Amino acid sequence: MAYRETILIKLDSNTKKKMKSVKTNWSELIREFIQRELEKKRNIAKAEKLRAKLFRKSRGIDSTEVIRRMRETRYGPNST
């Protein structure tokens, strides 16, 4: 994978010293972290879109009228 963009982060000197003392590819670790976070955000956006679609108010059906008819069928026309 060819990398073209660069980002800059600022750290306190103590954190930088600790990072140097640990044998880790910090660039790769940060890239992986960013990719995971982007995937999470993408999944959340997809879930929100799906939720909105599922719970969108249906058109043409009055649920109160349906419930009223069901009750009248079950208990008679004067039931509440």
Image (spheres, grey):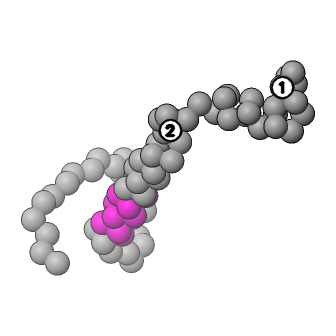
| Magenta stretch: includes residue 37 | yes
Please state which of residues 31 and 26 is positioned toward the viewer in this rendering.
Answer: 31
Estimate how packed mark 2 is, as few (under 14), some (14 to 19) or many (20 or more) residues with alpha carbons within 10 Å.
few
Q: What residue is drawn where x is 59% and y is 30%?
A: 62
Counting residues from the N terminus, which is met first, the one under dot 1 or under dot 2? 2
Kindly tell me whether residue 14 is visible in this rendering: no
78 left or right of 26 in image: right
Kindly tell me whether residue 62 is visible in this rendering: yes
Give coordinates of residue 73: x percent, y percent: 82, 37
Query: Image quadrant for the N terminus?
Result: bottom left
Please state which of residues 15 and 45 is positioned toward the viewer in this rendering.
Answer: 45
Give coordinates of residue 6: x percent, y percent: 15, 58
**Residue linked to disc 2:** 58
Label 1 with label 2: CB-CB less than 8 Å: no
20 left or right of 65 in image: left
Query: Image quadrant for the C terminus?
Result: top right
Q: How would you classify the magenta stretch by its main secondary structure? A: helix
**Residue linked to disc 1:** 77
Residue 61 to residue 48: above or below: above
Tally the marks: 2
Closer mark to the observer between disc 1 and disc 2: 1
Dot 1 amino acid type = Pro
Q: What residue is drawn where x is 37% and y is 56%?
A: 42
- Label 2 secondary element: loop
Give coordinates of residue 77: x percent, y percent: 83, 25
- Measured Cα–Cα span from mark 1 to mark 2: 26 Å
Instruction: Give the magenta range.
Output: 29-41
| Magenta stretch: includes residue 3 | no
Q: What residue is drawn where x is 74% and y is 33%?
A: 69
Q: What residue is drawn where x is 30% and y is 72%?
A: 28
Give coordinates of residue 5: x percent, y percent: 13, 60
